[in-house]
Image (tube, rainbow, N blue to C red):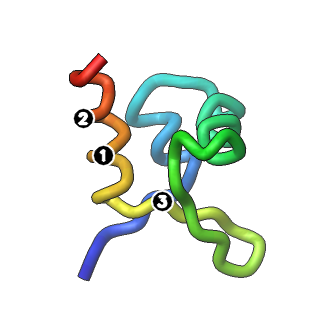
Amino acid sequence: MEKYYTPEEIADNLKVHLKTVYNWIKNGNLKAVKIGHFWRISESELNRLLNSGEQE
């Protein structure tokens, strides 16, 4: 089963502001699912985001 992270966990791990993570979601740079009132980001999507930076 895949692990899911909260936007807060992503921001803490990447040392970015929480608003940055929400902007990535809003702009489509980071795919997230909304469960109830809460956003969740899959581990594979986080890895995709991190690996996409290596391509540029």
Q: Earlier in the sequence, mark 1 or mark 3?
A: 3
Residue at 30% in and 17% down: 56
- The local crowd at label 3, few if under 14, some if 14 to 19, many if 20 or more residues have their Cα within 10 Å, is many
C-alpha distance separating marks 2 and 1: 5 Å
Looking at the picture, which amino acid does disc 1 mark?
Arg
C-alpha distance separating marks 2 and 3: 15 Å
Residue 30 is tagged as none
Residue at 32% in and 58% down: 43
Residue 51 is tagged as 2
Looking at the picture, which amino acid does disc 2 mark?
Asn
Looking at the picture, which amino acid does disc 3 mark?
Ile
Dot 2 and dot 1 residues touching (CB under 8 Å): yes
- The local crowd at label 2, few if under 14, some if 14 to 19, many if 20 or more residues have their Cα within 10 Å, is few
Residue lying farthest front?
A: 56
Q: Label 3, on which residue?
A: 41
- The local crowd at label 1, few if under 14, some if 14 to 19, many if 20 or more residues have their Cα within 10 Å, is some
Which one is nearer the viewer's eye here, 5 or 54?
54
Dot in front, 2 or 3: 2
Q: Position of residue 54 (x, y in %)?
A: 22, 22
Q: Position of residue 23 (x, y in %)?
A: 69, 36
Residue 48 is tagged as 1
Q: Position of residue 49 (x, y in %)?
A: 37, 39
SS class of the residue under badge 3? strand
Left or right: residue 41 compared with residue 51: right
In this rendering, the answer to whether 29 lies above or below 17 is below
C-alpha distance separating marks 1 and 3: 11 Å
Left or right: residue 20 compared with residue 36: left
Please identify the quadrant where the N terminus is shown. Answer: bottom left
Dot 1 and dot 3 residues touching (CB under 8 Å): no
Residue at 36% in and 48% down: 46
